[in-house]
Amino acid sequence: MRLAPRLRMAVLTVVVVAAGVGVNQANERLPPYGETSVAMELGRDAVVPPFQILVHGARGAEHVQDITGEPLTSSGVWVLVELSYATLDRSGTPQEFELRDSSGRRFRSSERVAGANPWEAGADIWLRGEIVFEVPRDALGELTLVVWPQGRDQGLPNRYGQLLLWVDPLAVEEELAVLAQPVLLDAGER
């Protein structure tokens, strides 16, 4: 009779350990649920599925000229973020770009600037250009660029990229900033 309780305890221990190992293995192989941030670094490739993204830098400007040649002014300032990206598999376009200032305010990429909307890239076909934001002058300084490849709330998991940027409030360009049109890059270029 003493063997049965010990055998049950041994079997129960094996089952609990096996379940723990199974859960750990599943956690390593299955993506987490909910939103997950991918840390990005300035000047380095980052994988934010289904995109590869490289942010080159950001600048502030009083006035911007879009691809139609139209000069645009703002009650605040323009922030131009230069970046390049490609997809990991099929063609696509990131759904949303956002800047957040140190106070937590959020600014979506501007729809007023022709040619500043995200452009369609392909699998390992890199495009480079600028995304434009219109922000109040007091938002300048430390900004966080957030890239939502598939938009918000588009199913689980929902990954997004984050990158800290510095746009010097004292170095805002006063002359007309000409928006760089998206350019298809040669193989190996970013």
Image (tube, rainbow, N blue to C red):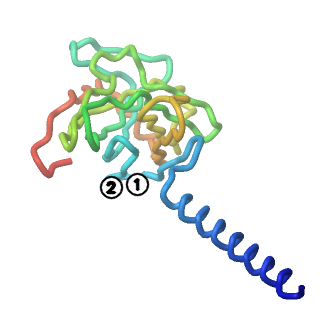
Residue 64 circle label: none
Taking the view exactly as shown, the residue that stands out farthest to the front is 1
Mark 2 vs 1: CB contact within 8 A: yes
Residue 22 is left or right of residue 167, and the answer is: right
Q: What residue type is labelled 2?
A: Arg
Q: Residue furthest right?
A: 1
Side (left or right) of 110 relative to 176: right
**Can you give x and y, in whole percent of width and height, for residue 122 in the image?**
22, 35
The residue located at (56%, 58%) in the rendering is: 27
Residue 121 in picture, x, y percent from top left: 24, 33
Q: In which quarter of the image is the N terminus?
A: bottom right
SS class of the residue under badge 1? loop
Where residue 167 appears, x then y in whole percent? 44, 42
Which amino acid type is marked by label 1? Glu
Extreme residue in the bottom direction: 2
Question: Based on the displayed image, in which of its 4 quarters is residue 14 positioned?
Answer: bottom right
Q: Which mark is residue 41?
A: 1
Q: Is residue 35 above or below residue 109?
A: below
Can residue 171 be seen?
Answer: yes
**In this rendering, is residue 69 above or below 165?**
above
**Which residue occupies 83% across, 87% down?**
3
The residues tagged by marks 2 and 1 sit, at their Cα atoms, a distance apart of 6 Å
Q: Which of 151 and 96 is in front in this view?
A: 151
- The front one of 21 and 155 is 21
Q: Which residue is drawn at 52% across and 27% down?
A: 107
Residue named by callout 2: 44
- Which class describes the residues within 10 Å of circle 2: few (<14), some (14-19), or many (20+)? few
Number of numbered markers: 2
- In terms of image quadrants, where is residue 105? top right
**Relative to the observer, which residue lies in front, 80 or 152?**
152
Above or below 32: residue 91: above
